[in-house]
Image (cartoon, rainbow, N blue to C red):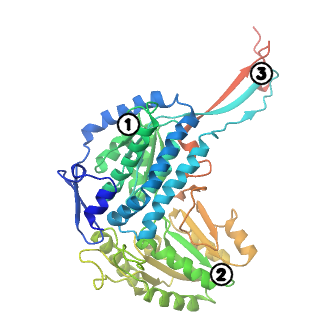
Amino acid sequence: MTHSAILTAAGLHQTDLTGGDLTVRSPIDGAVLAQVHQTTAADMPATIARAQAAFAAWRNIPAPRRGELVRLWGEELRAAKAELGALVTLEVGKITSEGLGEVQEMIDICDFAVGLSRQLYGLTIASERPGHRMAETWHPLGPVGIISAFNFPVAVYSWNAALALVCGNPVIWKPSEKSTLTAMATQKTMERALARFGDDAPDGLCQLVIGGADLGAALAASRDVPVLSATGSTRMGGIVGPQVMARWGRPILELGGNNAMIVAPSADLDMAVRAIVFGAVGTAGQRCTSLRRLIVHRSIHDDLVARLERAYATLPIGDPRSPGTLIGPLIDSAARDRMLAQLDKARAEGGRVFGGAAVTEGVPDDGAYVSPALVLMPEQTDTVRTETFAPILYVMHYDDLEQAIAMQNDVPQGLSSCIFTLDLREAETFLSAAGSDCGIANVNIGPSGAEIGGAFGGEKETGGGRESGSDAWKGYMRRQTSTVNYSRHLPLAQGVRFDL
């Protein structure tokens, strides 16, 4: 399909794509896809006010009824999966299966949230006072601001929006300027669901704003946006998080990841190679969960490196829409330049680089294509500790598990981690309190590909936020502990006496 045909199939019209001052290009070939109209910072107070008005109505809608809206949204996403997946590929350069997989992730979280709408459970708590009942209930918080990044242009929004909506909160979405068209197409699926849902959905329930950092700053500064979920760089989170907390809001931060795999002597190396290559080069290394550090036992280091060099030498790089392509472009030339500069730093620290060059043959013109890099490092240096959003995999060796875990944890980020081992003791140690310090820890699978059933997020400079499954829904609600006295007396807790 042509670029224009993909845009039309995704429900975008000429009025959406022309006349604006934000130029949207495809990383595949640098082609201009649209000139999009931006929201101005002056528009934000009215946008937030509409969300506050919507909250006053939406919080009173029963949660299972709120879940019906999300169920309808899931139906719209199913119907638009092929078209929306193709647009993800066109706008951010993911290969076709990954573009479709991202839309499937949206469908999956809708299914999760529909069930959740009937399971917003609190607790009944034993009281020490006779004739008293204690209980814990959960209530909506208010408008939720969502700032998303280009690398998962729609899935991360859905993690937040599906949960926020069933919890009783409106949403305001500010996508990356590099992925505005997928956001606009996703918003149209939501608008169709809202139309089917009917009058119970108030105006301003789901809003989209297009523009730069000034819009995110407006969300971070507003006391009328009690929850702000922000996905992006650690630098961005270091700005947004303190702003939200300074006005007593609640930040949900999903920031950088410098994810490692430990490969033990007992590992199934055939499985490990597959997991390493997908983890390191999938999405051209532009996942927050991409594999960036490989910590290999000295006894198998050379064998594993030889296998990886053979695999890397045959990776198909090119147009992500072409069958068989496994690695598409980086998001832009600036990302390519940062990758190449980081490899120069690694060389200066004694690193031996395999791959890691700009690719110009057999790929579309004006795209930022690179060959993934394996970098054999003598130790874990400052360069290794710095996350670069590109397909760079640093390889180091270790002698004992305690040393490997210390290396794994000795970075500022704490998102995802994994170990390949057939030794039960090693696996359980890695998952113990003395093991990985990351929010995600896997055994015999790579660091990428988290399912929506588990809470997603990490520690340290990753931000501490949790999204998607498990009890991540609690981040969008306020907890209330209540006590009812149904006796004829007024005993005080802890044996306090206050007789009048």
Q: Secondary structure at mark 1?
A: loop
Q: Which labelled disc corresponds to residue 264?
A: 2
Q: Nearer the viewer, mark 2 or mark 3?
A: 2
Asked whether disc 1 touches disc 2, contact meaning CB atoms under 8 Å apart, the reply is: no
Of residue 376 and residue 466, the one placed in the foreground of this image is: 466
Q: Position of residue 284 (x, y in %)?
A: 41, 73
Q: Nearer the viewer, mark 3 or mark 1?
A: 1
Q: Tell me how far mark 2 sits from mark 3, CA to CA.
A: 59 Å
Q: Residue at x 45, y 53 (%)?
A: 77
Q: Tell me how far mark 1 sits from mark 2, CA to CA.
A: 49 Å
Q: Position of residue 321 (x, y in %)?
A: 36, 73
Crowding at dot 3, Cα within 10 Å, few <14 / some 14-19 / many 20+, comes out as: few
Residue 387 visible at all: no
Of residue 351 and residue 331, the one placed in the foreground of this image is: 331
Q: Residue at x 56, y 31 (%)?
A: 62
Residue 53 visible at all: yes
- Judged left or right of residue 354, residue 164 is right
- Judged left or right of residue 47, residue 289 is right
Res 454 quadrant in image: bottom right
Instruction: Provide the residue designation for mark 3.
Output: 496
Q: Please, what is the three-letter code of the amino acid marked with disc 3?
A: Val
Of residue 408 and residue 167, the one placed in the foreground of this image is: 167
Q: Position of residue 447 (x, y in %)?
A: 55, 69
Q: Please, what is the three-letter code of the amino acid marked with disc 2?
A: Ala
Instruction: Provide the residue designation for mark 1.
Output: 222
